[in-house]
Image (tube, rainbow, N blue to C red):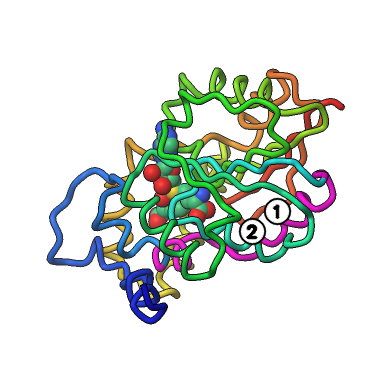
């Protein structure tokens, strides 16, 4: 396929999923969402690109040639494509896993457009039901929040046991604060952030409602203590912006 055609196929449409004329429904990762997904993340995840480049720095320091990086809930492959670019000479293998077929179709097209199809393998499977032993790193960016709370600990335990000694988990999540006032402030500041990026108040409110029972955030302490409980020796925050955070968890070497 000529690259202008591919470019056209992967260019994201503007995210208008929750503008006035759309019907209210629970949030699902279908074709309609995939079309606007990259625009949605760029406009609704604070410091999305900086989190990816900061994560690449940690991979650079902790991983060795021959290690495999698994991006769980890789969506349209943006993170892995950026890792490929930033860590080109490190000799790493990249695998993206997602349960949404339409997301992975887009990811594959983007990999072809950037000529990285030989460097990244995409697998369609449920990340709570997978087995990939001897991993160097698992990336879990804005995806744990969609897994039912009661299943989270067993899921993370499986990741810990699949990491090689000294391997790392990089976890980025939307979070809550148990201080009610701060929690309200953080959400309000996040909504101002979305407004500044062109979302209307109605769109913000409708999206919040659609995510209500689907995206269930924990606090930093809840995430940290779950990771420690499971056996990760070190857990540190490497990024925080109000109600968004990234943690690194290291398995003992
Ligand atoms: N059980 C599951 N198994 C596999 N995939 C799943 C599962 N549940 C949800 N997903 C997938 O997890 C992704 C969550 S998006 C991640 C953003 C990306 N990490 C990014 O940084 O660009 C975040 C968001 O949309 O808010 C979607 O692609 C789902 O199909
Ligand atoms: O748009 C919102 O209001 C969200 O909270 C969505 C979201 C949160 C974190 C990662 C990706 C999308």
**Mark number displayed over residue 55:** 1
**Mark number displayed over residue 39:** none
Mark 2 and mark 1: Cα distance apart in space: 5 Å
Q: Tell me: is circle 2 under 8 Å from ligand 1.
A: yes
Res. 137 visible in picture:
yes
Res. 184 visible in picture:
no
Location of residue 3 in the rendering, given as x and y in whole percent from the top left corner:
41, 78
**Residues rendered magenta in the picture:** 39-64
The reply to whether the magenta stretch includes residue 10 is: no
Give the residue at mark 2.
52
Please tell me how crowded label 2 is: few (under 14), some (14-19), or many (20+) other residues with Cα within 10 Å: some
Up the image or down, 23 lies above or below 237; here it is below
Q: Secondary structure at mark 1?
A: helix
Q: Residue at x 35, y 43 (%)?
A: 100
Location of residue 117 in the rendering, given as x and y in whole percent from the top left corner:
52, 58
Q: Secondary structure at mark 2?
A: helix
């Amino acid at each position: 396929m000529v690259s202008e055609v591919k470019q056209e196929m992967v260019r994201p449409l503007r995210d208008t999923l929750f503008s006035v004329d759309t019907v209210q429904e629970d949030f699902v990762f279908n074709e309609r969402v995939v079309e606007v997904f990259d625009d949605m993340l760029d406009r609704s995840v604070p410091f999305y690109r900086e989190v990816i480049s900061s994560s690449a720095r940690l991979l650079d320091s902790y991983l060795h040639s021959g290690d495999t990086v698994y991006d769980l809930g890789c969506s349209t492959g943006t993170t892995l494509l950026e890792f490929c670019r930033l860590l080109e000479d490190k000799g790493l293998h990249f695998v993206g896993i997602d349960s949404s077929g339409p997301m992975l179709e887009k990811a594959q097209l983007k990999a072809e457009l950037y000529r990285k199809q030989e460097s990244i393998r995409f697998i369609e499977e449920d990340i709570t039901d997978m087995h990939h032993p001897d991993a160097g790193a698992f990336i879990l960016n804005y995806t744990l929040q969609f897994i039912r709370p009661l299943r989270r600990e067993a899921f993370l335990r499986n990741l810990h046991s699949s990491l090689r000694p000294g391997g790392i988990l990089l976890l980025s999540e939307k979070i809550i604060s148990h201080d009610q006032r701060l929690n309200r402030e953080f959400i309000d500041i996040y909504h101002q952030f979305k407004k500044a990026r062109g979302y209307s108040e109605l769109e913000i409110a409708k999206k919040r409602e659609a995510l209500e029972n689907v995206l269930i955030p924990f606090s930093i302490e809840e995430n940290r203590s779950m990771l420690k409980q499971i056996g990760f020796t070190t857990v540190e925050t490497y990024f925080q912006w109000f109600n968004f955070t990234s943690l690194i968890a290291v398995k003992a070497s």
